[in-house]
Image: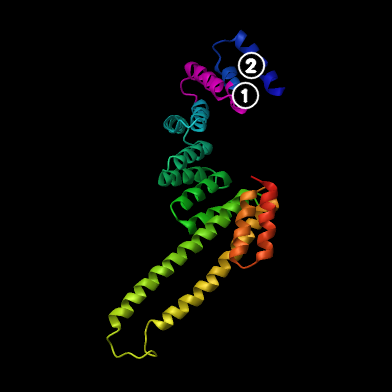
């Protein structure tokens, strides 16, 4: 195949110029693309022996170590790549992914922002930034980033799925806030129960009614946004069973049982197990 032909060509160059780093780098990238990570690491190490400050080798090695779940080394090599070449946006993005894996969400946000400063249209970095915000329960910020991804890649199904999840979580958080407000309100009612206020003069009843109307309207809007996001995810990836399942749950919560049944059946047909 093409990969093997390329490897043969690089080996031919190495036979003539054994101390020239570029053919080793070419071989390393080929093995990386073939997912032969151990052989790829071996070739990258040869590159660094011949050219110790080759930033792109540190970059790829950082990715490989991360994929092999050696996250300390992944961070170390990506940091070195950035030290050697601070203007390479993908290095910050890959470091962001490692930091998300490690649960270092604030650091991940910082790395993603640096990638986006270098390349504002780097949609993968926007999605990673959204993931970090989502993990910190910063759902408004996450929604903004997922919408940016959709604007840059309107047919990217995963971005719609991410958006649907963030909209759902945002709605759930608002309901929790409502519950706490109700708790506070009830405590103040209890404190004021000994006063001579009549029901008409109750300063809390209007607030409670307004908040209830707001919550009901907000819930309906949230569900409609979720449905729209999940449907677009399925539109652009008809085998996206997670989106189909979440859409079924959403329709069920919205009382649209026929639609819920349809998407449950669709989920089963995509992933029977």
The C terminus, quarter of image: top right
Residue 49 lies in the magenta-colored region: yes
Give the residues in magenta: 28-54
Packing grade of label 2 (10 A; few <14, some 14-19, many >=20) is some
Residue 240: x %, y % from top left: 65, 48
**Please, is residue 67 above or below residue 159 in the view?**
above
Viewer-proximal residue among 208 and 7: 208
Q: In this rendering, does residue 238 appear at all?
A: no
> Residue at label 1?
30
- Going from N to C along the chain, the mark reached first, 1 or 2, is 2
**Please, is residue 252 above or below residue 162 in the view?**
below
Residue 83 lies in the magenta-colored region: no
Viewer-proximal residue among 197 and 70: 197
Q: Are marks 1 and 2 in contact (CB under 8 Å)?
A: yes
Q: Which label sits on residue 10?
A: 2
Q: In this rendering, does residue 209 appear at all?
A: yes
* Residue 206 appears left or right of 30: left
Q: Residue at x 54, y 48 (%)?
A: 127
Q: Residue at x 51, y 25 (%)?
A: 57
Residue 195: x %, y % from top left: 28, 87
* Residue 214 appears left or right of 225: left
Residue 197: x %, y % from top left: 32, 90
Viewer-proximal residue among 91 and 240: 240
């Amino acid at each position: 195949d093409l990969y093997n032909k390329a490897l043969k060509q690089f080996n031919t160059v190495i036979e003539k110029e054994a101390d020239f780093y570029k053919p080793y780098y070419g071989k390393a990238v080929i093995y990386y693309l073939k997912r032969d990570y151990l052989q790829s690491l071996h070739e990258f190490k040869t590159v660094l022996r011949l050219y110790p400050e080759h930033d792109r080798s540190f970059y790829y090695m950082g990715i490989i170590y991360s994929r092999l779940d050696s996250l300390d080394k992944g961070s170390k090599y990506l940091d070195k790549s950035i030290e050697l070449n601070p203007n390479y946006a993908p290095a910050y993005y890959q470091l962001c992914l490692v930091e998300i894996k490690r649960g270092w969400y604030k650091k991940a946000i910082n790395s993603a922002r640096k990638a986006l400063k270098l390349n504002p249209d780097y949609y993968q970095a926007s999605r990673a930034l959204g993931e970090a915000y989502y993990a910190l329960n910063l759902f408004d910020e996450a929604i903004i980033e997922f919408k940016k991804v959709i604007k840059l890649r309107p047919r990217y199904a995963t971005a719609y799925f991410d958006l649907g999840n963030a909209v759902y979580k945002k709605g759930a958080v608002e309901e929790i806030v409502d519950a706490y407000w109700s708790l506070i309100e009830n405590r103040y009612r209890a404190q004021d129960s000994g006063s001579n206020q009549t029901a008409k003069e109750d300063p809390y009843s209007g607030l409670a009614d307004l908040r209830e109307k707001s919550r009901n309207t907000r819930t309906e809007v949230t569900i409609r946004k979720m449905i729209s996001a999940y449907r677009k995810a399925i539109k652009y990836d008809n085998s996206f069973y997670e989106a189909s399942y979440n859409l079924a749950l959403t329709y069920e919560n919205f009382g649209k049982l026929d639609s819920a049944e349809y998407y449950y059946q669709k989920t089963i047909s995509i992933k029977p197990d």
